[in-house]
Structure formats: structure tokens, C-alpha cells
Image (cartoon, grey):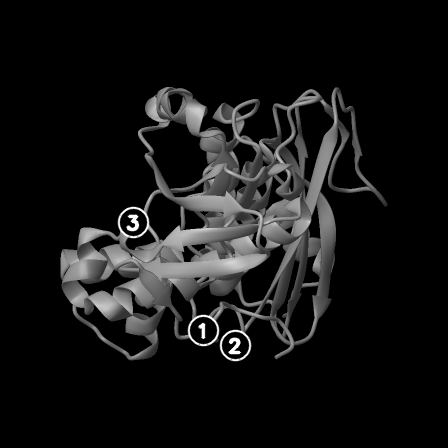
Amino acid sequence: MGQDEFQVISKYFQRSTEDSAVLLGIGDDAAVVEVAGPMVVTTDTMVSGVHFPSETSGDVVGYRVLAANLSDLAAMGAEPRWCTLALTMENAQDEWLAKFSNGFFDLAYEYGVSLIGGDLTRGPLVVTAQLFGVGKKDHLLTRSGGNVDDQIYVTGSLGDSVAGLSLINKGIADASDRHQVLKNRFLRPTPRVSEGIAMRGIANAAIDISDGLLADLGHICQASGCGAVIDVERLPLSEELRTLFSLEEAQNFAICGGEDYELCFTASPDDEPAIKKCLEPSGTKAYPIGQLVKQPGVVCHRSGKPFMPASTGYLHFT
């Protein structure tokens, strides 16, 4: 006998919360929360066959849709608090739902996020999460705060996620540590939430790298009314990426590949010591890769010469 939507919600998604700001959660027509400070809201949708392979395990799908939203809040310097979830699927399969909810709540509990509502319907697999966070007044990070002569930084390492996806799509079953590290960067990315919060008041502009460095840095430049020059040889590449791929492949992954969910941000050159200090508790490093300039557009240099990457990053509807 099949399950109706209310049974599915009760079984897999109705979890208790210790957040006293949640006045009314799942079970009514709408949720009610008490907010102190600016509310920061983001939404992300993932479609089977577009954002993840159709055979992807439910726990990975649940984890990734929340990770994408957490990364957006990280780029704003906001503290994650509450989430709604809209899930469309062909059938209410217990095994898939159990894995999905486990993956979702594993990450939600790690970052203190309470699921407070959502929707469930039948159709092709599509998952949409809306995440609510609280920012600090006068210290929100935005794309529009960049200044000419700011240094451009990125956290962590770039290109790993798309490299991991390429290994998955090619069906490479090698279980070595290097292969698994890259695959996990796609399957279970780490949102830089604590890093974004730590950089409030230091970074001038920020964005998370979801569509690729070139595309996302271009958004900062457009919003800030400037351009950028980046040195491809300064891009942080993981040892796993450099070992399993050629240098040219690795650099193209780093420039154009998306879904690393690292942060790209700009700051005054004088603030480099402050950036290093504020990131120490997280253990994450930030690497200067270029500079904001007056001339519009994003220009790549390699070995001192202009360099044209293989693509400009992920674009929807193209």
C-alpha cells in the first residue's frame, strides 16, 4: 500500500528543533519564526539529469541541495537558521527517501538549520530548498562592494568538484584516495559558512563559486562597476587534481568549473594579515589570485601573457 504525502512528511521530514525562534514549524499552512536582525534568504533548485546524474543516491541529493544554499548564505556572511524544502518525485520510495532525509539532516544539524516547512508533489525529480539566515547589520557581504585595486581571493582549492564529476560521468571506478577526494568534492562539498561570517567587516565583496570562477567573478565586477585581472598560475590547485589531470586540464577546471562552493572575495591589499588571522580558526586558507581594475571584464594571464580559457563557466538556458 502506497504512502500519501502526509505520511511521507511525518516519517521522513518532521523533526524536532531546539531553536526557540521557531514559533510554528511543520504541520500548519505556514511556518512562523521570530527574527532578530536582517533576514537573508536564498533559494536553490536541483534537477535530476541537469545538476546531478539521475542515478545519484538520495543522501547525496539531500546533502547537495542544502549545501548549495548554505554556500549562498556563506557568501553573504550570514548565519544559517531555517529552511523550507519542496520535493517533486515520481514515486515515494522508502529507501530513496530514507537516504535523502539522512543526507539532508546530517548537514542541517551540522550547521544548526531547522526544517520548518515545504511541499511534496508527484513528477520528475526536482528538489528546491529555501534557506533563511540572519546577517549582521552594516556588515553584510554583497557582490557590489568591490573597489578598484582590491585584491581578489579564493578559499580552499578550485576545480576539484568538476574534476570529480568528470570521473563519475566516465564511470571510473578507481577507489584510490585521490579519486575519492575529487569525487567527494562534487558529492559532498563543504560550504564555507564560518569563513563568510569571519570575513564580515573585512571583505568588500564576495560570491560563492557555483557557476565557475570566471563567471562568478564576472558577477562581482558587473555589480561593482569594475573589471578584474587574474593570474592563472596563482590559482590554488589540490594535489589530487594536479596528480590525476594535466596542468592545462586542471587550470581549466579551476577557471571554468562550477560547484566548488568556495568563496571568491575582494579586500584591500592592506587587509591581507587580517584575512589570514580571521580564517585561522576554520583552518581554511585564502589565496590572492589577482586584482580589481578599472577596465571592465575579466582577463586571465598565464606566464605574463593573456590566456583564453576553454569556456567561461556554466550558463543556464544555453
Q: Amino acid at mark 3?
A: Arg
Q: Residue at x 73, y 41 (%)?
A: 26
- Which of the marked residues, 1 or 3, is nearer the chain's N terminus? 3
Disc number at residue 234? 3
Q: Callout 1: 10 Å neighbours few (<14), some, many (20+)?
A: some
Residue linked to disc 2: 49
- Which of the marked residues, 2 or 3, is nearer the chain's N terminus? 2
Q: CA distance from mark 2 to mark 3?
A: 33 Å
Left/right of residue 147 with respect to residue 25 in the rendered view: left
Instruction: Please tell me which residue lies in front, 5 or 189.
Output: 189
- Which of the marked residues, 2 or 1, is nearer the chain's N terminus? 2
Foreground mark, 1 or 3, reads 3
Left/right of residue 158 with respect to residue 150 in the rendered view: left
Q: CA distance from mark 2 to mark 1?
A: 21 Å
Residue 311 position in % (x across, y down)? 45, 73
Q: SS for tag 2? A: loop
Q: Residue at x 50, y 32 (%)?
A: 267
Report whether residue 222 is seen.
yes
Report whether residue 98 is seen.
no
Instruction: Please tell me which residue lies in front, 204 or 88.
Output: 204
Q: Residue at x 70, y 36 (%)?
A: 40
Foreground mark, 2 or 3, reads 3
Residue 297 position in % (x across, y down)? 56, 59
Q: Are marks 2 and 1 in contact (CB under 8 Å)?
A: no
Q: SS for tag 3? A: helix
Residue linked to disc 1: 311
Q: SS for tag 1? A: loop
Q: Amino acid at mark 2?
A: Gly
